[in-house]
Image (cartoon, rainbow, N blue to C red):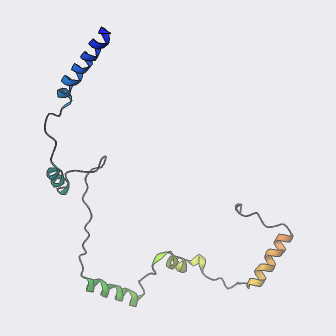
Amino acid sequence: MKTKLALSAVAAAIAVFSQGAFAQASAPASRAEVKAGAQAKSVAPAGEKPTAAPSKTSDKTRDERKETTKADKASGNLKSAGEAGALKEDKAMKSTGTETTRAARKETTKAQQKNKELKPAGESKQ
């Protein structure tokens, strides 16, 4: 019983006196100091180096950009937006002049299926 009392007293003493060892050497920065550091870009996210952000402002006015777009459209230099425009301009997608009707394609597919020439869905063409 005396050893349990002695051990608990020693543990309590260690806990009381060790708090000074874990204390910080200086007071933590105030919220205002942290915000000022972040605004000055001196604080980077963890694991990243601070980099200069690209400018979000244009060197042209809105009217100049509109005029440039109109001129490009008139001269044919303006391309379609999105992926659909890229597909329309692709030479491989252009018509070869040997189009078949839907009915003819269906008949061809039925004949291939009957002769077991069709591959199951998902298999490669090789």
Quadrant showing the N terminus: top left
Q: Nearer the viewer, residue 47 or 111?
A: 47
Q: Give residue 67's position: percent from left, percent from top.
A: 30, 88
Q: Give residue 45's position: percent from left, percent from top.
A: 28, 50
Where is 23 relative to 95, above or below? Answer: above
Q: Write down the quadrant of residue 93 in the picture.
A: bottom right
- Does residue 35 appear left or right of residue 3 in this picture? left
Where is 71 relative to 107, above or below? Answer: below
Q: Give residue 120's position: percent from left, percent from top.
A: 76, 63
Taking the view exactly as shown, the residue that stands out farthest to the bottom is 74
Q: Residue at x 25, y 67 (%)?
A: 55
Q: Residue at x 19, y 26 (%)?
A: 21
- Does residue 103 appear left or right of residue 81 in this picture? right
Q: Residue at x 70, y 62 (%)?
A: 122
Quadrant showing the C terminus: bottom right
Q: Nearer the viewer, residue 95 or 19?
A: 19
Where is 14 relative to 119, above or below? Answer: above
